[in-house]
Image (cartoon, coloured by chain):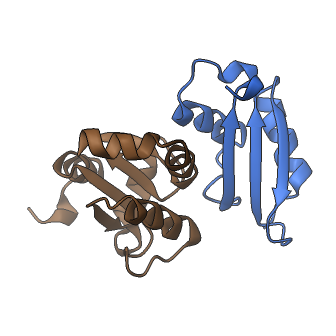
Amino acid sequence: MTDAQIDPQTRIAGIVKGNDIVLFMKGTSLFPQCGFSSRAVAILDRLGATYETVDVLQDPDIRQGIKEYSDWPTVPQLYVKGEFVGGSDIMMEMFESGELQELLVTEA
Amino acid sequence: MPMAADEIEELIKAGIPDAEVSIRDLAGDGDHYAARVVAKSFEGMSRIRQHQAVFAALGGRVGGELHALQLETAVPNGE
C-alpha cells in the first residue's frame, strides 16, 4: 500500500510513535511558513533538541487529520515519546518555566 | 472575516462562565489576537485541557475564522 491508501489517523499514529520528538508544522525547520511554527522551531533549536518535522502543507490528509488526532485545531503541534505536549503557546510557557527542557532531557 | 475582540471575549465567557478574559489585538488588524483566560474552573486541568476548553467555547473558530490567536490560560492567584 502507498501512504495515501493508509488511513490518515493510522499514518499520524505511526509518525508520532516512531519518533521521540516530532513537530507537525507549516513549512520546514529551515523555512517555517507561519509565525507560530517558526516560534516552535526556535524553541526546539534553542534547547538543542534533535527532532523530526512534518510539513502539513505538503499533505492535506495530514493537515486535516492532525487536528482530529489530538482534538487540537491548530498547527504546530509537538509530540514527545508519543504524547501530545501542546501548541506553540504551551511550548513557550513550558520553555520559560524550564519544563520543556526537563521533558526533552528525560524523555529523549 | 476578522472577529472583533469583544466577540471573542463574549464567546469565551459564555463557554466558561467564571473566566476573566483579557484580549489584545496584536497587529491592529482584527485578525491577530492574544487572549489571557483565567478561571477557577481550570484548576486540576492540564494546560492542554485548559486550552481545549477555550477552543470549545470558541466553537470551532480557532484554526479557521480565528487563525491567529495566542492563548495563555491560568487559574487565579498565578498558580
- Frontmost residue, B30 versus A29: A29
Colour of the chain lettered B: blue
User: Is residue B55 placed above or below B29 in the rendered structure?
Assistant: above
Residue A22 seen: yes
Which part of the image, by quadrant, shows the N terminus of chain B?
Answer: bottom right
Q: Residue at x 83, y 31 (%)?
A: B14
User: Is residue B26 placed above or below A70 in the rendered structure?
Assistant: below
- Tell me which corner region of the image, top left, top right, bottom left or bottom right, holds residue A102: top left
- Counting from the top left corner in percent of width and height, residue B23 is at 84, 50
Q: Residue furthest left?
A: A1
How many marks are shown on the rendered structure?
A: 0
- Frontmost residue, A11 versus B35: B35
Q: Residue at x 54, y 50 (%)?
A: A73
Q: Residue at x 38, y 53 (%)?
A: A65
- Judging by colour alone, the chain drawn in brown in this rendered image is A
Residue A70 seen: no
Q: Residue at x 17, y 64 (%)?
A: A3
Q: Is residue A27 left or right of B14 when viewed as pictured?
A: left
Q: Residue furthest right?
A: B6
Q: Is residue A47 left or right of A89 when viewed as pictured?
A: left
- Frontmost residue, A19 versus A43: A43
Q: Residue furthest bottom?
A: A31
- Tell me which corner region of the image, top left, top right, bottom left or bottom right, holds residue A107: top left
- Counting from the top left corner in percent of width and height, residue B31 is at 77, 66
Q: Is residue B32 left or right of B51 when viewed as pictured?
A: right
Q: Is residue B67 left or right of A42 when viewed as pictured?
A: right
- Counting from the top left corner in percent of width and height, residue A100 is at 42, 45
- Tell me which corner region of the image, top left, top right, bottom left or bottom right, holds residue A4: bottom left
Which part of the image, by quadrant, shows the C terminus of chain B?
Answer: top right
User: Is residue B33 placed above or below B27 in the rendered structure?
Assistant: above
